[in-house]
Amino acid sequence: MSTHPTCCPNPVECILPPHMIDVLKMRGNAKQRRMAQRLEKEGLKFRTQRQTAEPADAFMAAPAVAADAEPRLEREVYDCQKKATLPGVLVRAEGDPPSGDPQVDQAYDGAGDTYRLYFEAYQRDSLDGHGLKLISSVHFRRDYNNAFWNGSQMAYGDGDGTIFQPLTGDLAVIGHELSHGVVQFSGGLMYRDQSGALNEHFADVFGVLTKQYKLGQEAAEADWLIGAGLFGPDINGRALRSMAAPGTAYNDDLLGRDPQPFHMDDYVITQSDYGGVHINSGIPNHAFYLASMMLGGNAWEKAGQIWYHTLQNINNPDASFVNWAEETVGQARAFFGVGSREAILTQRAWKLVGVF
């Protein structure tokens, strides 16, 4: 993609980064090149769609639920039957038993796991804070190597079995894509340059936290990967991205090498991918990882609280890395005290990645 229009604050956010599509267009066989060109064309189409159905107050900070509030989890999972029409045929609704279709049940369970993280750890009632129904569609198109949040629902492809396996296979991906909805309903972060990288960063953070919360993992126990296990059997890579070691998630003859930097010294200036939003997100991702590791324990309890409330309070859709980092330090001081260990280590994490 050679341009990144500024008119759309909430384009369709896909898990497959455009730089990977670019590599497939250059290195793939004829079938893979056609697939990459189709993905690029669809991405451009999706990203020009405006979310006209959003209510006028959609960008208000979500109210915290009461301590004794009951969850209002409501899920629906549809089968697109290899077609591109959303949502498809309803297969499983809230309270229904497992369907026996692995992708349907993974989407259903993953939506519930994401809801529970936000409800139980951050007192947020679904993506919009008001009990929004979580709609997912699986088996989108044939051999579709992507998953996306389109502003109102999730869609997952099955992969082609060569480059990717079914995209519902990693809970961090489900949590990531649904967390784009949280960004959308929390004031938004413009999908370009550093604010766009922060948009992707927030989704990565709460994608991995969804997985850690589900598994009961402390920061030191987690893999800190987004897309773990989704590559096909012949792809040399662990995941799409690594928050612990950006730039090391994959190194493959077809897909190339993970281009994410972990420090501002290596910040990538590019016109593709809306200014490198999937690439430069590695820098704040690593800052969150470092803060979580230095603080220890469950990452959703301290670093997660700081980052969640940063999104709720920053009120700056064009936020830069410095703006975001300053707000995290402010939130750490508000929650834990001005001279607290949490505030000091949050600031240190940003210094270690070169933002401060």
Image (tube, grey):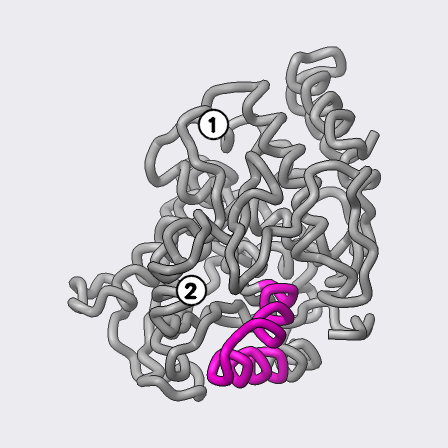
Q: Is residue 46 above or below residue 163?
A: below
Q: Is residue 314 above or below residue 189?
A: above
Q: Quadrant of residue 101?
A: bottom left
Q: Looking at the image, which residue is at 53% across and 85% down?
A: 34
Q: Looking at the image, which residue is at 43% across and 77% down?
A: 144
Per the picture, the main secondary structure of the magenta-coloured stretch is helix
Q: The magenta stretch spans which residues?
A: 17-41
Residue 149 x %, y %: 53, 68
Q: Is residue 6 left or right of residue 232?
A: right
Q: Is residue 59 magenta?
A: no
- Would you say residue 140 is visible in this rendering? yes
Q: Looking at the image, which residue is at 51% across and 84% down?
A: 30
Which mark, residue 134? 2
Q: Regarding mark 2 in the picture, which secondary structure is present there?
A: strand
Instruction: Give the amino acid type for the residue marked by disc 2 in the picture.
Output: Leu
Foreground label between 2 and 1? 1
Which mark, residue 219? 1
